[in-house]
Image: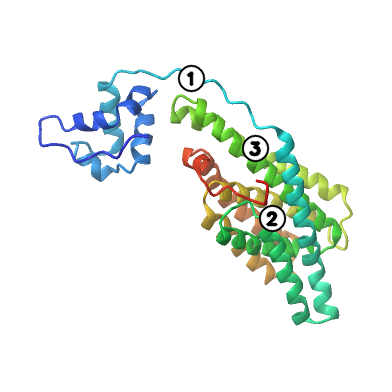
Amino acid sequence: MSRPGRAPAPSGDPVRALMADHRRLCEQAVDPLDIAAGLEDVGLSDTAAARYRHADVFSLAEELYARVERRPEPPAPAAPAAPWGPDTARALGTAALHLPAAGLLAAVPWLAQVVGPVAAVPAALLAVGWLTLAAPAAAPTARAGYGLAAGLLIAPAAAGGLGPATVLALAAGAADLASRRLRDAGRRHLATAPTEAEYRARMRPLLPVAVGAQFAAAGLAAAALPAGDVPAAAGPVQAVLAVLLLLVAVLLRGGRTTVAVAGPAAVGAVLSLLPTAAPAVHLVLCAAAAAVLAPYTWLVLGSPRACRAESDGGPPGD
């Protein structure tokens, strides 16, 4: 995109140099807000706008919009969407990797009672290792962080038996598939949208739809599969955890590793300290985490930088 605005020459028109640096942005903008967003993306702040005799970036963008003639680029031909087959196969592989990990985590409380807490530690560590292999990220630190965060999140809900463990494994596979399709949609819109404002408008409804589908699918799976020795209220907990897994996958593929790992890991750590808490407490904690992460993930998904992120690796074959 455009280069950051350089310091203006001492002349009677300090905006002229900025116009030259960002002419393409100004020519293709559909409104001043589009220019303001572009300037902020390249690091021009309100303090820098003062050098151009403006109080903030938005008033500077209004002058640029008024002075530069519009010359929108013709829309590029739409790139074909990536086929669903490979993504679906990879998502099934992700679910298959999560299933033994969830099963091990479900067995940890039983092992702790029968063999002892110390003997249950290797099973928990092995589960975290399995989850690390399934992480939707390329960097080793991101993979390790995902393994720990996902393990802490899944363990309390999976403790009810094979049914809840299977639900969460399937939810992880669905999260992997949805995050891949969202990334693919973002890259296609990035190539065809004439402006960043149009790109954001196209991406805006995608995450809410994906979250709704993830919640509904996990809820139906929890109702259909045997629940084990857990209250019926545990079903909504599994559905909310499925949404959290989706948000984590989207953030990791968007290059936001710290937020993707730290938030869920903190919630999982709290849940691990409340093994006997009612499902309603788990539901409130997980829903609060999802309510915080969802708006941030929505903003990240609307940023072109998220689709250009190179940290979107994953299991082999990604």
Residue 208 % position (x, y)? 62, 38
The answer to whether one can see residue 204 in this image is no
Instruction: Look at mark 2 in the image and give the residue it sits on.
Output: 134
Q: Nearer the viewer, residue 258 or 225?
A: 258
| Mark before the other along the chain sequence, 2 or 3 | 2
Q: How many angstroms separate mark 2 from mark 3 (CA)?
A: 17 Å
Q: Do the residues bearing badges 2 and 3 touch, measured as CB atoms within 8 Å?
A: no
Q: Position of residue 297 (x, y in %)?
A: 55, 46
Foreground pick, 261 / 283: 261
Binning the other alpha carbons within 10 Å of mark 3 as few (below 14), some (14 to 19) or many (20 upward) gives many
Give the image location of residue 225, x and y in percent.
87, 51
Amino acid type at circle 1 is Pro
Q: CA distance from mark 2 to mark 1?
A: 38 Å
Which tag is nearer the camera, tag 2 or tag 3?
2
The residue wearing badge 3 is 181
Q: Secondary structure at mark 1?
A: loop
Q: Residue at coordinates 56% horizontally, 61% vertically from top-left?
A: 141
Q: Horizontally, is 118 left or right of 148 in the view?
A: right
| Secondary structure state at the residue bearing disc 3 | helix
